[in-house]
């Protein structure tokens, strides 16, 4: 083999190695931005899973005061170690509309859903902000949109235009199995049933720039 041909082959090998390395890096980054896991939870209990970036995926049980109360869970993403009473505890609700009616984050018998309807609604898609600063920003926008009479017309229009524009991750939850007592809407009073247990799978995707620190 000539020296010239040998140099060409070496160059090809280097280019191929660099290309493969780049592709592997891209694949690794894509995998790092996507997380999949499975879980199960029984009525009245909390499910919490570390999803990275200082965040937890949470299924928070509804507080039941007595028989017939809505039961099930609310889908949340919260800062790791945060208290349920923290003002910065639910990164999902501020960017997952609708805000005044049934919502994918309500895995429960709220808003007129029977137990069988709640567990049959799958997959459930939701979004979430990535930090408390963006939570406060989106909370302020939602507040202006939902209660516009407390703010100027300019503030309301600006909030409506920018609502949900903070960097967000996305999530999907599939209910794979469940145990429940069916509800009956035809009865008076309406009996919505009870969700006793669910088995589920979740996929979480982060945006590409989610590791960048927030702007001061």
Image (cartoon, helix red, strand yellow):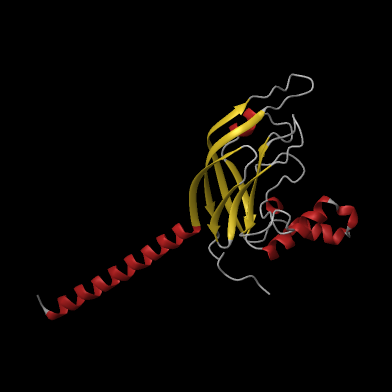
- Name above or below for residue 199 compared with residue 57: above
* Res 168 → quadrant: bottom right
In the image, 150 versus 58, the foreground residue is 58
Q: Give the percent coordinates (x, y) of residue 51.
A: 54, 56
- Name above or below for residue 152 compared with residue 109: below
Count all numbered tags in the image, as a single digit.
Answer: 0
In the image, 106 versus 79, the foreground residue is 79
Q: Give the percent coordinates (x, y) of residue 115.
A: 65, 30
Q: Give the percent coordinates (x, y) of residue 119.
A: 60, 33
Give the side of residue 84 with respect to residue 1, left or right: right
* Res 153 → quadrant: bottom right
Tell me which residue sits at (69%, 33%) in the image. Answer: 109
Give the side of residue 141 with respect to residue 168, left or right: right
Tell me which residue sits at (64%, 24%) in the image. Answer: 182
The quarter of the image holding the N terminus is bottom left
- Name above or below for residue 47 compared with residue 191: below
Tell me which residue sits at (29%, 69%) in the image. Answer: 17
The quarter of the image holding the C terminus is bottom right
Question: Which residue extends farthest top?
Answer: 187
Q: Give the percent coordinates (x, y) of residue 141.
A: 77, 58
Question: Which residue extends farthest left?
Answer: 1
Tell me which residue sits at (73%, 41%) in the image. Answer: 63
- Name above or below for residue 19 compared with residue 48: below
* Res 9 → quadrant: bottom left
């Amino acid at each position: 083999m000539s020296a010239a041909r040998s140099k060409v082959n070496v160059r090809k090998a280097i280019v191929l190695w660099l290309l493969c390395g780049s592709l592997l890096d891209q694949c690794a980054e894509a995998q790092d931005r996507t997380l999949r896991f499975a879980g199960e939870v029984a009525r009245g209990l909390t499910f919490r899973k570390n999803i990275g970036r200082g965040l937890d995926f949470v299924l928070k049980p509804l507080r039941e005061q007595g028989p017939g109360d809505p039961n099930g869970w609310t889908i949340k993403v919260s800062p790791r170690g945060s208290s349920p009473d923290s003002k910065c505890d639910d990164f999902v609700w501020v960017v997952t509309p609708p805000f005044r009616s049934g919502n994918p984050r309500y895995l429960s018998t709220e808003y007129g859903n029977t137990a069988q309807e709640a567990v049959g609604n799958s997959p459930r898609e939701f979004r979430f902000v990535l930090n408390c600063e963006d939570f406060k920003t989106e909370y302020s926008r939602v507040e202006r949109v939902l209660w516009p009479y407390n703010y100027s017309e300019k503030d309301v229009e600006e909030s409506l235009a920018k609502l949900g524009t903070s960097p967000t991750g996305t999530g999907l939850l599939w209910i794979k199995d469940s145990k429940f007592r069916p509800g009956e809407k035809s009865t008076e009073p309406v009996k919505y049933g009870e969700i006793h247990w669910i088995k589920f799978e979740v996929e979480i995707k982060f945006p590409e720039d989610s590791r960048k620190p927030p702007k001061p």
